[in-house]
C-alpha cells in the first residue's frame, strides 16, 4: 500500500528552536513542548506574549502540498472572522516554507504557524455545539468555494470517496471477528449511497475537521487546525467528515447530525444529492477510520495519536447499527431544506416593511442591512457577510452569548411568571446588582426598558419631593413615552417636537469641546449653570446621563457631575443618573459612569445592556425614596424582573465578571482611543476624539478653528465603513459625531480593523 505511515522527523527541541531563531528571527523564543501529530513534528514555541507552532514536515511531503495548505489557510483567514485558522508566518527572507536537513541527512520543510488558543471540541458538549460546528464548517466551505491548487489534487486514503475501498482492503486487519464482520456489513449497506458520487460537486476541502482539530472557547467554536489532509474531492466531504466527529460521544447522535446539517446548509447550501449522501459518507468515514486504525496499529503499534478517536467511533457505529439507516439518512437530508425557503429578498422585506410597520422609524444606512445572525462583536447578513458591530451597546457581552442564551432557555423551560411569587433569581439578581452600586443605592425595581426606568424614576422623585418640575441637560434623550419626550430636548427641540414644557428646565450640555465652557474650570462652570436651571423653580429632579449619548458621546469635564449633583440636592431635588447607555462596565476604569467623577446619585436608571438584548431595565434608589413612593398605590410591572429576565441579568453579570469585560473595555478602549488619535494627526476633518473605555466619540469639523460641523462628511464616512463591513453611526446635535460603543467583547484586533477602515474612509 502506497500510503504507509512514515515516521515523522525526530529533532531535538534545541535544534527546533535554533531553526525558528535563525530562519524567522522571531526574537526571544522558548520551546514549551511538542504537540502530537500524525505527520509532522510540531514544537510549541513562546515568544513574548505570542505562541507559535514550528512544523517540520516529513521528507515525502512536497512543497506543493504545503503551499496549498498555506494558501488555503491564508484564504480562510482573510475571508472570515467566524473562526480562526493557524496562519503561516513569513520567514526573515519572506518565505512561508523554509528548508533544513535533519540529523539523518534528510531534507525537511519547515514552517511556523500562529498558535490558536482553545480546547478541543472532543472535550466539549457535542450536543450543545452541533449547530455552531455545522455553521463553522459551512462558512469554511463558503470561503473555500472556488479555491483550486495543484497541491490539493492527490491520492489520499482519507478521501471519503475511497472509504469503502479502505474497508474492503483492510477490514481483515481488525482483530475482533465480530467487529470485522460488522464493519463489512455496514459498508455494504452504505454502498448504494456511493453510486451518486460521480455526480457530486468537487472542491478543495480541509478534510479533517475531527474533534481534536476543532477548537472551542467560551462555549463557541473558534478555531480549526491542521490543514494536512487538504484535498480536492467531493465538496460534501467537508460536512461529512465534520458530522462524523460531531456525532462521536454525543448523547443523541442523530439529533446532532440534523442540527449540524441544518446549520451547515444555512451557510453553504447543499444540493439535494449532496444532502442525501451526507450521513452515509459520514458513517463511511467512521468505518474507514476504525479500519485504518487497525491497519495503522499493525504498522506503528506505539503511535497513540493514530487511534485517538477509535473507541468512540466504534461505540457510535454500534449505536447506528440499531437504527433504520435509510430513514435516518432521509431525516438528515430533510434538515437541509431548499436554500432559504420562503426567505424574502432585501427588496421584498423593504416593501413589506413600508406596508406593515409604522413609518416613524428609519432604517440604518443608504443600503439597508438584512442581518440574520450575530456572534460576539459581529453581525452576519443574509448572504453570510460579516460586519464588525461598533455601535450595539445592548448586546453588551457579545451577540448571542451562549451563557446568556442558555440561561434564558433553561429558565424559560422551567418557569416564567410575574414577581408576585417568591423567587430566588429575582433576589439573587437584586443582591448582585446592588453590590455593584455605591451606598445608599440599595432598593430595586425591575422594568422592561430604559424608558420604563426613567418613567418610574420620575414618579419616585415626584413622590419623594412632592414637586413637579424637572431639570434636564440640553440634548438629552431619556425615553419614548409622552412624558419622557417632554424631558428630552433631543426630541422636543428636534424634528416634530412640540418645544419645551413650562415645567421643564434645561441646563447646558456639559460639552468641553464645543460648548461655552472649555477650560480647566469647565466642570465647575457647567455645574453652576445647572445650579442656575435648578434655581428657576423648585424641581423634583435633576435628570442627567452620566455621559451624554445623543448629545454626542460627551465626557463631561471633571467636577461637573459631582458639582451638579451637590447643587441639586442642596435645592431639594432628587438626582437621577441615567446610566441606560453607559452603565455596567462600559467606561472601563469604573463600573458606572457617575463613578468617573466620584459622584453618587439618589436614583440610577438602567436599561440597554442589562439583558444583553433581552428587555430588562431597572431602577435602584435609596430606602428613603422607596419609602416615600410606597404611599398605598402599588407599582406592578407585568414582565419586570420575571424569573427569565432575572436569570438573564445574572448571566450577564457573570459573563462580565468571568470574562473580565470591564477590564477589556478599559484596555481595548485605551488602545482604540490611541489609534483614533493617530488618525486625528493625519486627517484635518477630525476635530476631537474623546471617550472612556468603550464609549467613544469622534467629532468631525470642517474647520478646527470655527468648529463648523462636518455633517455630510460624517454621514459619508459611516456609509463607506458600512460598505467595508464596519458598522458605525452618528450622533450629536449636528450629527457630526461618529458614535462608537461596541459590545465589550470587542478585541484589540477589532479596534485595529475599525481604525484601518476609518483611515481608508477618511
Ligand atoms: N436613556 C438613554 C440615555 C437612552 O439612550 C435611551 C435609549 N436610547 C433611553 C433612556 C430609553 O431606553 P429604551 O429605548 O430602552 O426605552
Image (cartoon, rainbow, N blue to C red):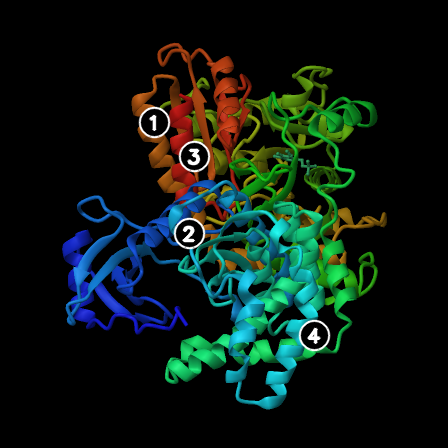
- For the point 14% across and 56% down, which residue is it? 22
Label 2, label 3: how far apart the Cα atoms are? 35 Å
Q: Earlier in the sequence, mark 1 or mark 4?
A: 4
Beta carbon at label 4 within 8 Å of ligand 1? no
Q: Is residue 432 above or below residue 77?
A: below
Q: Position of residue 90 (x, y in %)?
A: 25, 47
Question: Which residue, given by chain and number where applicable, does mark 2 sit on?
Answer: 152
Q: Quadrant of ligand 1?
A: top right
Q: Is residue 551 above or below residue 752?
A: above
The circle drawn on residue 754 is 3
Mark toward the start of the polypeptide (2 vs 1): 2
Please identify, in this view, whether the residue under mark 2 or under mark 3 is nearer the observer: 2
Q: Disc 3 versus disc 1: distance between alpha carbons?
A: 11 Å
Mark 3 or mark 4, which is nearer to you?
Answer: 4
Q: Secondary structure at mark 2?
A: helix
Number of dots carrying numbers: 4
Nearer-N-terminus badge (2/3): 2
For marks 3 and 1, the one nearer the N-term is: 1
Labels 2 & 4 near each other (Cβ < 8 A): no
Q: 510 or 610: nearer the eye?
A: 610
* Element under disc 3: helix
Q: Position of residue 256 (x, y in %)?
A: 67, 64
Task: Identify the residue position indicated by label 4 in the image.
Answer: 320
Residue at the spot 44% in from the left edge and 11% down from the top edge: 708
Which of the pair 638/138 is nearer the observer?
A: 138
Q: Earlier in the sequence, mark 3 or mark 4?
A: 4
Specify whether 355 is left or right of 592.
right
The residue labelled by disc 1 is 679
The residue under the point 57% across, 46% down is 396
Amino acid at each position: 500500500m502506497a500510503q504507509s505511515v512514515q515516521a515523522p522527523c525526530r529533532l531535538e527541541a534545541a535544534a527546533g528552536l535554533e531553526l525558528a531563531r535563525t530562519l524567522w528571527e522571531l526574537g526571544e523564543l522558548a520551546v514549551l513542548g511538542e504537540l502530537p501529530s500524525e505527520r509532522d513534528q510540531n514544537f510549541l514555541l513562546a515568544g513574548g506574549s505570542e505562541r507559535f507552532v514550528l512544523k517540520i514536515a516529513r521528507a515525502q511531503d512536497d512543497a506543493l502540498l504545503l503551499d496549498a495548505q498555506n494558501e488555503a489557510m491564508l484564504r480562510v483567514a482573510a475571508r472570515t472572522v467566524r473562526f480562526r485558522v493557524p496562519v503561516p508566518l513569513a520567514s526573515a527572507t519572506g518565505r512561508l516554507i523554509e528548508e533544513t536537513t535533519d540529523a539523518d541527512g534528510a531534507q525537511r520543510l519547515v514552517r511556523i504557524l500562529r498558535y490558536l488558543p482553545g480546547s478541543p471540541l472532543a472535550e466539549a458538549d457535542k450536543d450543545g455545539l452541533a449547530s455552531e460546528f455545522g455553521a463553522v464548517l459551512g462558512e469554511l466551505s463558503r470561503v473555500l468555494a472556488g479555491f483550486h491548487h495543484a497541491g490539493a489534487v492527490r491520492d489520499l486514503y482519507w478521501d471519503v470517496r475511497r472509504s469503502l475501498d479502505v474497508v474492503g482492503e483492510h477490514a481483515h486487519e481488525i482483530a475482533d471477528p465480530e467487529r470485522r464482520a460488522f464493519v463489512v456489513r455496514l459498508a455494504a449497506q452504505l454502498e448504494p449511497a456511493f453510486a451518486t458520487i460521480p455526480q457530486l460537486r468537487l472542491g478543495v476541502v480541509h478534510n479533517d475537521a475531527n474533534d481534536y482539530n476543532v477548537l472551542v472557547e467560551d462555549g463557541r467554536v473558534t478555531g480549526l487546525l491542521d490543514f494536512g489532509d487538504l484535498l480536492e474531492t467531493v465538496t460534501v466531504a467537508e460536512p461529512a467528515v465534520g458530522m462524523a466527529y460531531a456525532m462521536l460521544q454525543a448523547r443523541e447522535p442523530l439529533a446532532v447530525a440534523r442540527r449540524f446539517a441544518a446549520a451547515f446548509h444555512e451557510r453553504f447550501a447543499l444540493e439535494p444529492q449532496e444532502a442525501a449522501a451526507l450521513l452515509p459518507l459520514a458513517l463511511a468515514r467512521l468505518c474507514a477510520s476504525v479500519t485504518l486504525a487497525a491497519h495503522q496499529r499493525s504498522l506503528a503499534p506505539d503511535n497513540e495519536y493514530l487511534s485517538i478517536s477509535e473507541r468512540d467511533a466504534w461505540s457510535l457505529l454500534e449505536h447506528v447499527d440499531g437504527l433504520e439507516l435509510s430513514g435516518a439518512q432521509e431525516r438528515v437530508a430533510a434538515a437541509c431544506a431548499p436554500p432559504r425557503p420562503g426567505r424574502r429578498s432585501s427588496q421584498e422585506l423593504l416593501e413589506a416593511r413600508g406596508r406593515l410597520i409604522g413609518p416613524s422609524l428609519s432604517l440604518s444606512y443608504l443600503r439597508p442591512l438584512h442581518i440574520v445572525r450575530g456572534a460576539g462583536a459581529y453581525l452576519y447578513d443574509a448572504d453570510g457577510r460579516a460586519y464588525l458591530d461598533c455601535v450595539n451597546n445592548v448586546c453588551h457581552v457579545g451577540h448571542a452569548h451562549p451563557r446568556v442564551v442558555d440561561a434564558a432557555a433553561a429558565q424559560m423551560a422551567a418557569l416564567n411568571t410575574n414577581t408576585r411569587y417568591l423567587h430566588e433569581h429575582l433576589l439573587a439578581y437584586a443582591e448582585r446588582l446592588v453590590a455593584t452600586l455605591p451606598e445608599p443605592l440599595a432598593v430595586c425595581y425591575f422594568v422592561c426598558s430604559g424608558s420604563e426606568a426613567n418613567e418610574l424614576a420620575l414618579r419616585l422623585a415626584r413622590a419623594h419631593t412632592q414637586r413637579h418640575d424637572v431639570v434636564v441637560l440640553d440634548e438629552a434623550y431619556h425615553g419614548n413615552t409622552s412624558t419622557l419626550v417632554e424631558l428630552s430636548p433631543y426630541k422636543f427641540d428636534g424634528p416634530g417636537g412640540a418645544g419645551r414644557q413650562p415645567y421643564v428646565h434645561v441646563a447646558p450640555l456639559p460639552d468641553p469641546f464645543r460648548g461655552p465652557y472649555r477650560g480647566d474650570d469647565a466642570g465647575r462652570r457647567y455645574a453652576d449653570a445647572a445650579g442656575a436651571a435648578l434655581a428657576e423653580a423648585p424641581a423634583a429632579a435633576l435628570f442627567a446621563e452620566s455621559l451624554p449619548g445623543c448629545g454626542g458621546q460627551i465626557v463631561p469635564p471633571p467636577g461637573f457631575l459631582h458639582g451638579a449633583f451637590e447643587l441639586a440636592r442642596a435645592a431639594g431635588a432628587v438626582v437621577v443618573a441615567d446610566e441606560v447607555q453607559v452603565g455596567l462596565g462600559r467606561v472601563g476604569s469604573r463600573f458606572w459612569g457617575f463613578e468617573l467623577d466620584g459622584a453618587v446619585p439618589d436614583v440610577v436608571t438602567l436599561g440597554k445592556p442589562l439583558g444583553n438584548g433581552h428587555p430588562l431595565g431597572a431602577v435602584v434608589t435609596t430606602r428613603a425614596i422607596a419609602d416615600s413612593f410606597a404611599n398605598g398605590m402599588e407599582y406592578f410591572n407585568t414582565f419586570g424582573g420575571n424569573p427569565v429576565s432575572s436569570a438573564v441579568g445574572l448571566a450577564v453579570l457573570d459573563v462580565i465578571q468571568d470574562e473580565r469585560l470591564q477590564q477589556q473595555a478599559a484596555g481595548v478602549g485605551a488602545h482604540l482611543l490611541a489609534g483614533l488619535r493617530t488618525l486625528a494627526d493625519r486627517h484635518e476633518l477630525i476635530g476631537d476624539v474623546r471617550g472612556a473605555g468603550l464609549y467613544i466619540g469622534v467629532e468631525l469639523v470642517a474647520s478646527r478653528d470655527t468648529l463648523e460641523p462636518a455633517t455630510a462628511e460624517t454621514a459619508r464616512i459611516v456609509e463607506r465603513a458600512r460598505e467595508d463591513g464596519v458598522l458605525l453611526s452618528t450622533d450629536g446635535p449636528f450629527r457630526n459625531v461618529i458614535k462608537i460603543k461596541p459590545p465589550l467583547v470587542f478585541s484589540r484586533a477589532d479596534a485595529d480593523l475599525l481604525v484601518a477602515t476609518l483611515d481608508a474612509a477618511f
